[in-house]
Image (tube, rainbow, N blue to C red):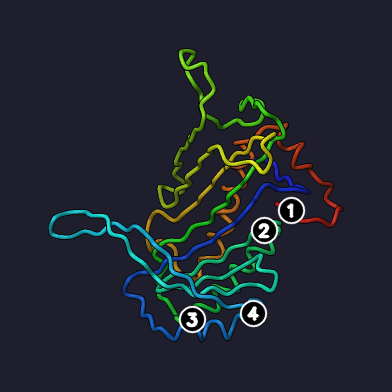
Amino acid sequence: MAEVRKYVNPPAAEVICEFRFPEDTPWDMTYPGVLYSSLKDDYPKRDQRYVREVVMLLGPEGLREELLVSERSVFLAEDEGCAVQVGPRLLTVSCQKPYVHWEAFSEKIRGAFERFQEVIGADAIGTMNLRYVNIIEIPEREVTLSDYFAFYPVLPPELARAPAGFITGCEFAFHDNRDNCRVELTDAVPESTKNNAYLLNIDYFLAEEKSIPPDGVGDWLEIAHTHVRDIFEACIKDTLRDRFTIREEEAPVAAR
């Protein structure tokens, strides 16, 4: 297990927790409105969005891709930094930068999930995931990735030229293949042309559907966060940790 570090300026641009429920879970178009009534003290702003998703469907001709458009209700905090999205058999809780510490974010997840259960009463969870989208900007025109990252693409000597863009990724299994974690590092668009930016995406998810009961969500979230934190620390070097500024425990600031 990696050492627990807390940062003054963590790179998390967005943190998302999503629950998807089985197709046999009852659904009614009135559910979002009822749920909003329970959450509006924390999420007073309400919006509607249409989301396009590519799904795999099994038919007589075999597997096929199909584009589905679904409507979601979005409940936003007053400052719009955190949000809850609700759609047919779906619940998402997210927070954007500045990242709130895990204790606060996990409380938001549990609160929204409990309200969802009070309204819908799902008997099972299909899948769920905890995803950290980290944007790391380095104020240098030319960056040697190995100076900052322990996880990065390694090129053979025959390809000595720096690539114009890249993506490297792995997927790891945990807990006897019950959970998986997808890790990706790609180049990103920096805020300044004098800088370089990178996206480190860590997505921990329940791979074995329906393997966690609703009353096991809290324990699963803690396990997921521990693995995400350890993987994040394994992917970076001290040169980046210095940029995020490790804080003293007594300093009352947000932490990863």
What whole-number distance in Å separates the C-alpha atoms at marks 4 and 1?
26 Å
Report the residue marked by disc 4: 44
Nearer the camera: disc 2 or disc 3: 3
Badge 4 amino acid: Pro
Q: Quadrant of residue 76?
A: bottom right
Circle 4 or circle 1, nearest the eye: 4
Q: CA distance from mark 1 to mark 3?
A: 32 Å
Disc 2, SS = helix
Q: Is residue 36 above or below residue 89?
A: below
Task: Say which element carries label 3.
Answer: helix
Query: For the residue labelled by badge 4, is the local secondary structure a helix, a strand or a loop?
Result: loop
> Sequence order check: which comes first, mark 4 or mark 1?
4
Give the crowd class for mark 1: few <14, some 14-19, many >=20 residues within 10 Å. many
**If you read the primary sequence from the N terminus, does the residue marked by circle 1 or circle 3 appear first?**
3
Q: Earlier in the sequence, mark 2 or mark 1?
A: 2
| Residue at the spot of label 1 | 255
Residue wearing tag 2: 102
- The percent coordinates of residue 139 (x first, y second) are 72, 34
Asked if the residue at tag 3 contacts the one at tag 1, i.e. Cβ–Cβ closer than 8 Å, the answer is: no
Where residue 189 sits in the image (x, y, percent)?
59, 41
Residue density around tag 2, few if under 14, some if 14–19, many if 20 or more, within 10 Å: some
Residue marked by disc 3: 32
